[in-house]
């Protein structure tokens, strides 16, 4: 239910509130999706997965170490 809650309920509420950016982080799948608000709906602007680092909007001047956000000892699927 959590993924559904994030993708449907929360993203819809954030869109109605004009939240400019949203990230969906799936620690088990080792993925991060970045969405930008548009008047027609969310636009997915980035997707990253696995180990390494990524520059994710709107904080793209900072490299995020992805391994730091995955659960300890969890291997990517």
Image (cartoon, helix red, strand yellow):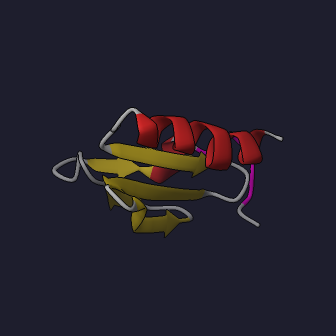
Does residue 40 lie above or below 9 as drawn?
below
Using the image, determine if residue 75 lies above or below residue 47.
above
Residue 28 or residue 1, whichever sits in front: 1
The residue under the point 75% across, 50% down is 74
- Residue at horizontal 57 percent and vertical 48 percent from the top: 25
Q: Is residue 72 above or below residue 35?
A: above
Residue situated furthest right in the rendering: 1
55 horizontally vs 27: left or right: left
| For residue 68, side relative to residue 64 (left or right) | right
Please identify the quarter of the rendering in which residue 22 is found.
top left
The front one of 12 and 62 is 12
Q: Quadrant of the N terminus?
A: top right
Tell me if residue 4 can be seen: yes
Magenta: main secondary structure equals loop
Q: Residue at x 54, y 49 (%)?
A: 24
Count how many numbered circles sit on residues in the image: 0
Q: At which x and y percent is residue 16?
A: 43, 38
Compared to residue 48, the image places residue 69 above or below, namely above
Left or right of residue 35, residue 4 in this image = right
Q: Is residue 73 visible?
A: no
Q: Residue furthest left?
A: 61
| Residue pictured at 22% horizontal, 53% vertical | 60
The one nearer the camera, 24 or 41, is 41
Which span is picked out in magenta?
A: 70-75
In the rendered image, residue 53 lying in the magenta stretch gets the answer no
Residue 56: quadrant of the picture: bottom left
Location of the C terminus by quadrant is: bottom right
Residue 51 pos. (x, y %): 52, 61
């Amino acid at each position: 239910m959590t993924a559904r809650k994030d993708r449907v309920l929360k993203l819809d509420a954030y869109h109605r509130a004009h939240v400019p950016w949203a990230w969906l982080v799936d620690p088990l799948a080792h993925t991060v999706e970045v969405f930008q608000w548009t008047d027609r709906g969310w636009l997915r602007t980035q997707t990253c997965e696995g180990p390494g680092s990524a520059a994710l909007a709107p904080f793209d001047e900072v490299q995020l170490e992805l391994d730091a956000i995955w659960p300890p000892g969890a291997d990517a699927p």
